[in-house]
Image: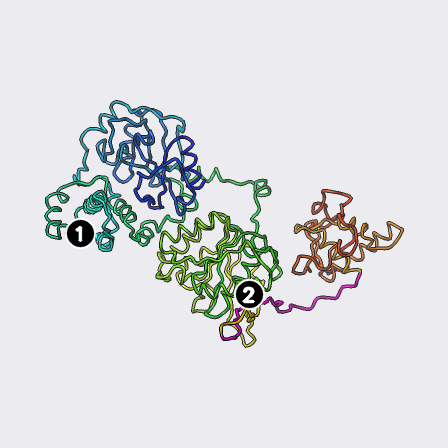
Amino acid sequence: MTPFQAAEALADACVPSFACGPDKAPLTRHGHLDATVDHAPAAWAGAALVGVPTGEASGWDILDIDVKGGGLDWLAANEHRLPASRRVSTRSGGGHVYFRARADMRCSVGRVAPGVDIRSAGGFVIDWAAAGFPVQHPGVLAEWPAWLADAARGPRVRHADNPERSNADLAPPSAEAAVALLDRLPNPAEASRDDYLAVMLAAKGCIDGLDGDGEDDIAEAAIGWAARWPGSPGYDAESEKWSADFATRTAPLAGWQSLLAVAYRLGADTTGERIAAAADDFAHVAVAPEPPAPVPARLRMLDRLLRPADCETGPRRGYIVKHLIAPGDVGAIVGAPGAGKSTLAPFLAYAVAQGRAVFGMRTKPGNVLYAAAEDFSGMRQRVHALKRLHADAPGFALVDCGNLLDADAAAELLEVVRIEQSALVVIDTVGAAWAGIDENDSAGMGAVVATARRIAATGAAVLLIHHTAKNGDGTPRGHSALNGTLDMCLSLSPLDDNRIVRGKLTKNRNGSCDREITFRSDAHTIGQDEDGDEITAPVAAELAAPAGPKMPVLSPREQRALDILNDIDVGEGVSDAVWFDACEQTGLVASESAANRRKVARQILQKLLDKRAITAAGGVLRSNRRNSLGTSGNSLEQRGTAVGFVPRNSGTAGTATLKGCSAVPPGNQDGRNVAEGLI
C-alpha cells in the first residue's frame, strides 16, 4: 500500500492525515495543521510515511513507548495493567498504544516514565501500520485507564542521569550540523511569529538533545538567524531575549526533527540532512519497510517460505525489453564520454514506447519518461530524428528533470511517473541529474540509489545513463553502491573509425551476458538552420552482432519443419506430439501412409538434432535458431498453411514426455538414433 492509498483508507474512516518524508518530517507547509481527509495524488508525491494529528483532530491519543529511554522496561512492568487496545509496532522497535482522545490530555515527554511519552492535542504520530508494521487489537480503541491518565497529566519523570533531557531523538547528528542548517536558514519577511518560536525552540531542543554540547555555537547561530529578519530589533536585542527566555526553557517536543520541519516550511533545501539522517534505511522505508526488531526473525521467515508449488504458480518476472530489463528493475548504460550512451538510450526508449523489437529482443509497449538532465536541447533534436525515422510514439515523453538532489524536483519526477504510469524511466545522466554529489561517497551515491529505487517501486523500470569506471572493467563510475543495486549494466565501447559501438553486458538478471548489442551512430538530417546549413542529430542504427561459428545448412524441408516448431512455440518449448500434429496439418510430408509420414518426420527430427538446429531436453523440443522477431522464417499464416492450428492433443503443448529420453543431447554421439521413439 502506498502512502497515498493509506491516506485514502484513513479518510474513509474520517481520520485526517498528511505526507511525511522517510525521516518523519512533515512535507506540508504547516505540518500537522495541514492534515486533511481530502487528498490529491500530487500532495503525496515523494511521501514515504503517513502522519496523523493526535487529539481531537483524529480521535486518537497515543502512548508512545520509546526503546532508547527505557520505555520497554516500563511496558514489561505494566503490561498487565493496560487494557486491550489498538497497538502498533514502530520502526525503532518500540510501540504506539492507542486510546480514545481526552479533552484534558496534552502532549508530554517523560511524565509517565522515562521513555514513555504522550501524543495528544497539538501533536502528531506516524501511522506505522500504514507502513506495514504489525498491529495488535486493530478494531479496539480503549478509554484511558484512570491511573495512566493521572500519570500522563502529572509532573514529568526525569532521567536520573540527565534531568534536562528525556528524548534522544531531539539530538542533531552534531552541533556543527545544527549550526550549518541555522546559518543557511531563510528568514523571509513573511515569516510568522510561530516560525520564529519554532526555530528558536528547535535550536534549544537540539542543545538539550546534545546534553549542552555546542550550546554557545547553536545559540549564536539561532540568534543570528533571528537578527536577519527584516523586523528584528537587532542582534543585541535578540541575544538578550535568548538569555532571558529561550536559554532557560526546556523544549521537550522540539529538537532536530522540528528544526528540519520548520526549515522545509521556510524553503530551505534540507536534502543533505535528510539523506544523512536516513542513509541506513531510506530505501527500506520508501520501498519496503524493514520489520520491527521485537518480532523474532525466524517467525518472519516462516511466513515467507515458498514450496515448489508456490514457485510454480507465482507471478512471472515479465519484461520491458525481453532478456534485458523488467518492471521494477534498475539498470544502467555506461561508457566513456562520446561513446554513444545518449544515442542508444533514446533509441531503446523510443522502441519501448512503440512496442518495436530491438536487437533481436521483443519489447512490451508502455509509456516512457525520458528525463534529460544533460543537453536537453540536443535530446529534443534526437527525438525529432527518431520520429522521422520510426513514426510517432505518443507514449514517449521528454522532460527536463532539473537537479534531483532538490527534494521538490525528486518529488515532482516521482509524481509524473505515477500520473503517466510510466513503464520505463530513463535518467540521462547521473552526473547531471544529481549535480553536486560526491560520486565516490556512499551517501552521495546512496541518494541516487534511493531515488531510483523509489521510482522502481511504482513498477517502472529505471535506466540510468552514467560514465564508466576509469579502470576499464565496464562498471559504473563512483561508489560501488550503484553497481551493487543494478539489475542490468550495459557497458559501451568507444566509437571506432566507422562510428560503430559495441555494447557488452557486465550484469544481467534477466538473461545471459553473452548478448552483444552493436550499433552505428548515424547523423540524420532533421532540417536547416537560418543559414541554410543542415541540422543533424545522431541516431542509433542496429547492426548484426559478429557472426558466431558457421551453422550447418538446412534443407528446404528441414527449414520448414523448424519454422513449424518456431511458429507454435510460445517460449516454453513444444512436446513431440504437438509438433508432429502441426507437421501433419501443414503437409510437411506428402504421403498417404501415416506410417511413412511418421517415419520421414522422425528422420527430419534426427537431422535437426544432428545439425543442432533444435534440442530435446526434459521432454520438450526447443529451437536454437530464431530471427529478431522470434521465428526462423515466415509465419504459418504468411506461408498459407493452417491458420489457427489446434493440436490434436490440445492442452498438452510442452508437457508430453519424450519416450525413453529424460535429457537428449544434440547430435548422435554414440551411434544410436536419438530421434528413435520420440514420435
Q: Position of residue 531 (x, y in %)?
A: 49, 75
Q: Which amino acid type is marked by label 2?
A: Ala
In the rendered image, the vertical position of residue 219 relative to residue 381, given as above or below: above
| Most foreground residue, 179 or 514 | 179
**Mark 1 packing: few (<14 Cα in 10 Å), some, or many (20+)?**
some
The mark found on residue 214 in the picture is 1
Picture colour scheme: rainbow
In the rendered image, the vertical position of residue 677 relative to residue 144, given as above or below: below
Structural distance between the alpha carbons of marks 2 and 1: 59 Å
| Most foreground residue, 551 or 138 | 138
> Which of the 4 quarters of the picture holds residue 669?
bottom right
**Mark 2 packing: few (<14 Cα in 10 Å), some, or many (20+)?**
many
For residue 679, say whether it is visible. Answer: no
The residue located at (79%, 54%) in the rendering is 640
Q: Which residues are magenta?
A: 531-556
Q: Position of residue 159 (x, y in %)?
A: 19, 37
Helix, strand or loop at label 2? It is helix
The mark found on residue 17 in the picture is none
| Most foreground residue, 447 or 36 | 36
The mark found on residue 385 in the picture is 2
